[in-house]
Image (tube, rainbow, N blue to C red):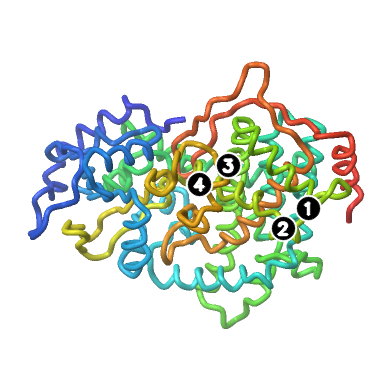
Amino acid sequence: MSILSRFDMIPLAILTVLFGLTLYIWYSGKKQLPYPPGPKRLPIVGNLFSMPSQEEWVTYRKWSDEFGSDIIHTDVMGSHVIILNSIKAANDLLDRRSPIYSDRPPMAALRDLLNMDFNITFLPYGPAWRHLRREFHINFLSTEMEVFRPFEQRAVHRLLRNFLSSPNNFSKHLRHMAGQIILSVAYGIDVRPEGDPYVENAENVLHALEIGSAKEATLFDTIPWLLHMPSWFPGARFKRRARKWCRIVDNALQTTHDKVKGDLDSGTAAPSVAANMLSKLDENSTELDLLAAKGVPGTMYMAGADTTVTALETFILAMTLYPEVQRKAQAEIDSVVGNSRLPDYSDQDALPYVQAVLKEVLRWHPVTPLGVSHKVIKSDVYEGHFIPAGSIIIPNVWGMLHDPNIFTEPDRFYPERWFSPDVPAFPIQAFGFGARQCPGRVFARRSIWANIAGILAAFKIVPTEDGPPEKKYLSGLVSYVKPFRCYIRPRSEAAASLVRDTENEI
């Protein structure tokens, strides 16, 4: 839901125009080359009122076709925005020129108003980011993650049991499963089957993230003086609401941090990333070490759950709309795994079609269709076009993964495409670019795969009597599937019995 109504934005726009001369850099600085092509701009406000507010990824892709360029230039109140619509452009700039394209925009709503500056995703390029990135890699080594496989498998099996008992609540069950995995791995918390306070805290943090990444929140980056606007000012409702959610986020993270610290002191701490990092702190620890001990598990807490849920909702939607894909994947599982057990991680390499389904889920609708914005730290030139220093770079991941020159019939859910030598080996763009690529991508892929394989082995997903649902997604940093209905039924009594038997696992 929008945080600021269009009415609320009117006084902001008027005052912005009045103060426009201080921001008016339309023609400032000398450039020898043209900007990349883009939609026509108005004086001072630029493209402020022409930027799309829904399904932006579709509009940005159309702009590439309209203006004949893989990169598009827009201007929002003097802030240059460069949109990358092709894998080639993203590779050339965000990967090969990563040292100057790995900064972040201010993200003031998230970092300043909601106190999420511990999150490595939002940190600017610099010493703090490098330190947390290094700690992420250390804690996400495959050998470090092996200890958590039983936790993940139990969470998947609990999800299957929940699907068996109340399939209509599949979105709720997906969220609980994702929360269970993240909380166990990040903090060693064994969550309750229902009504767990830590899961509820995680949901609150994710809701705050949704608020802080809403379209209106970017106004604080475009018009920085809004950060100093008094709370009674028209349009300041966002700041008032952010103050409340900031307290909720701080409390949620402090609660989990204190629990792990208490468990370490009493010698009862379960294996977790937080326990591992906190146990290494001593009197010689630096401020960056303290930040990492909070930021690494905290980022997992925020980043892992929502992305897993959204990917699995996309999977369920796809299975509802493409029954032939579901049948092929289930036939492969039956032939390899059989009917006497459920699939587990050891089956991944033997189930290439299920792997292709996972790849297609991440391509068909990426969890973050516009990625996370980058910022270029110095002026650059690309294919004869000038990119000013400080430009915000939006990687249109959806547009890249729907490029018809690479992915034939891009709107079709078609796992078979991943067996062709003409497409990339994996839609790695779904996990970011360059130095900013998601450090937990291997863990995320494994978790999503385990759930997909388990669901396919045990259940059949079909449309309701109302017919196939609509494929519709909401805008935001994480693009949620618009709520839809389907039937999730056991494939057989034998499959249902296998699911029930997981209740007894240790």
Q: Quadrant of residue 319?
A: top right
Q: For mark 4, what is the residue?
A: 363
Give SS at disc 2.
helix
Instruction: Estimate the spatial distance between the alpha carbons at disc 2 and disc 3, rounded to whole Å.
Output: 26 Å
Q: How many marks?
A: 4
Question: For the point 56% across and 68% down, which residue is it?
Answer: 136
Question: For the point 26% across and 28% down, which residue is it?
Answer: 10
Callouts 2 and 4 close, C-beta under 8 Å: no
Q: For mark 2, what is the residue?
A: 350
Q: Nearer the viewer, mark 4 or mark 3?
A: 4
Q: Amino acid at mark 3?
A: Thr
Q: For mark 1, what is the residue?
A: 336
Q: Is residue 248 visible?
A: no
Residue 153 disc label: none
Can you give x and y, in whole percent of width and height, for residue 407 in the image? 44, 46
Q: Earlier in the sequence, mark 2 or mark 4?
A: 2
Can you give x and y, in whole percent of width and height, for residue 252 in the image? 62, 50
Can you give x and y, in whole percent of width and height, for residue 278 in the image? 65, 71
Q: Amino acid at mark 2?
A: Ala
Callouts 2 and 1 close, C-beta under 8 Å: yes
Q: Earlier in the sequence, mark 3 or mark 1?
A: 3
Left or right: 204 in relation to 383: right
Q: Amino acid at mark 1?
A: Val
Q: For mark 3, what is the residue?
A: 310
Instruction: Estimate the spatial distance between the alpha carbons at disc 2 and disc 4, rounded to whole Å.
Output: 22 Å
Can you give x and y, in whole percent of width and height, for residue 375 in the image? 31, 58
Q: Amino acid at mark 4?
A: Arg
